[in-house]
Image (cartoon, rainbow, N blue to C red):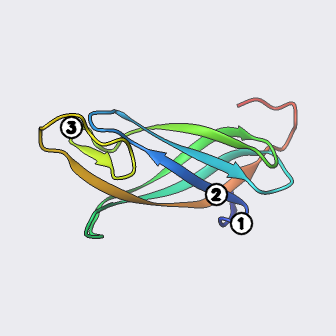
Amino acid sequence: MTPCDSSMISAAGFEKTLRSSIESLFLSNHTADTVSRVFLQIEYLDTGGRQLHCRGEHIGIILPPASTRRVELRSFDRQGTLYYHLSPPPRTKSTATPFMVKLRVDSLSYLSNPSEKL
């Protein structure tokens, strides 16, 4: 894995609705090479900025140069009581807690052989 920053790979468009077991986001490749793997750091914060959880995810993905792909991850919210503050608002009157995220792509791997598959 090669260290990287947001000028090489960016993460955006995070979404997680209430009761969903899936989180999604978009990864964009700003390099001239095809990426095969990224290591993403995700920090979950309450709306006051306090950390709720933090995790790292290795994501296998074929990401050609100048392209964007949607990625789905299993949610950290196992009880389904939290929702991302920019996702569509919950349609329920039950207690639901909004959260924010900080996304940082820490490192990546390039596809060593263009005919290689994940």
Instruction: Tell me the distance, in whole angstroms, between the alpha carbons under discs 2 and 1.
Output: 7 Å
- Mark seen at residue 10: 2
Residue 8, x across and y down, in percent: 73, 61
Residue at 68 percent across and 65 percent down: it is 4
Residue name at image x 63 percent, y 50 percent: 38
* Quarter containing the C terminus: top right
What amino acid does circle 1 point to? Ser
- Dot 3, how many residues are within 10 Å of its Cα: few (below 14), some (14-19), or many (20+)? few
* Image height of 42 relative to 68, above or below: below
Based on the displayed image, in which of its 4 quarters is residue 114 positioned?
Answer: top right
Residue 115: image x %, image y %?
Answer: 87, 30
Q: Is residue 29 left or right of residue 75?
A: right
Residue that label 3 marks: 79
Above or below, 108 against 21 in this view is below
Instruction: Pick the residue in front: 45 or 84.
Output: 84
Q: Residues within 10 Å of mark 1 (few under 14, many from 20)?
A: few
Disc nearer the start of the sequence (3/1): 1
Secondary structure of the residue carrying numbered label 1: loop
Q: Position of residue 116 (x, y in %)?
A: 81, 32
Q: CA distance from mark 3 to mark 1?
A: 35 Å
Q: Which residue is labeled 1 in the image?
A: 7
Q: How many marks?
A: 3
Sequence-first tag of 3 and 2: 2
Q: CA distance from mark 3 to mark 2?
A: 29 Å
At which x and y percent is residue 15? Answer: 44, 44
Label 2 sits on what residue type?
Ser
